[in-house]
Image (tube, grey):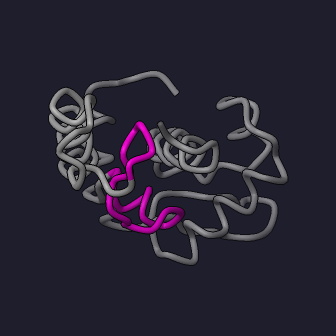
Amino acid sequence: MLSHTVEYALRATLYIARQTPRPVRIPEVASTIEAPPRYLAKILGQLAREGLLESTRGPAGGFRIAPRRERATLADIVGVFETSAPRRCLLGHGVCGNNPQCTVHERWAPIATSMSDFFGRTTIADLLSTRTSS
């Protein structure tokens, strides 16, 4: 359900956060999360511009989580790359919930709501404390 960009952004941010306070270079992150390095560079640059990551240049440079950003939610990361638009119907009936004849809505709506709640409430720090894999 997530775009490759968002998936790479989430995985990279969590990997970088686990390395704190050590800055991490793009080739290391790309290799670890199995992402194309040039594509990942653009993603990490955008996260740095949005203040979720810090970037430093030079031999000791790389990316690290920005100060106090461990409390950022997964929705904060997703929001950098995807606009908050109304959920679309899985069967193509426009906005989810607007078509009472939709055979999927009753089953899908609670799942979609649960996913939104998970991304909105789960922080980087929450996932670091559970020691999930990259």
Q: Is residue 29 left or right of residue 87?
A: right
Q: Residue furthest right?
A: 38
Q: Position of residue 109 (x, y in %)?
A: 19, 38
Q: Position of residue 90 (x, y in %)?
A: 40, 38
Look at the image and say whether residue 3 sits in the magenta stretch: no
Count of number-bearing discs: 0
Task: Using the rendered view, name the quadrant where residue 8 is placed.
Answer: top right
Q: Position of residue 79 (x, y in %)?
A: 42, 64
Name the foreground residue: 33 vs 111: 111
Q: Position of residue 78 (x, y in %)?
A: 44, 56
Q: Is residue 108 left or right of residue 106?
A: right
- The residue depicted at 32 percent of the width and 62 percent of the height is 86
Q: Is 130 rendered above or below residue 28? A: above
Q: Is residue 103 left or right of residue 132?
A: left
Look at the image and say whether residue 82 sits in the magenta stretch: yes
Magenta region's main secondary structure? loop
- The residue depicted at 38 percent of the width and 48 percent of the height is 93
Q: Is residue 91 left or right of residue 60?
A: left
- The residue depicted at 45 percent of the width and 68 percent of the height is 83
Q: Is 126 rendered above or below residue 60? A: above
- The residue depicted at 80 percent of the width and 43 percent of the height is 27
Name the foreground residue: 48 vs 36: 36
Q: Is 34 rendered above or below residue 28? A: above
Residue range corresponding to the magenta coloring: 74-93
Name the foreground residue: 79 vs 109: 109
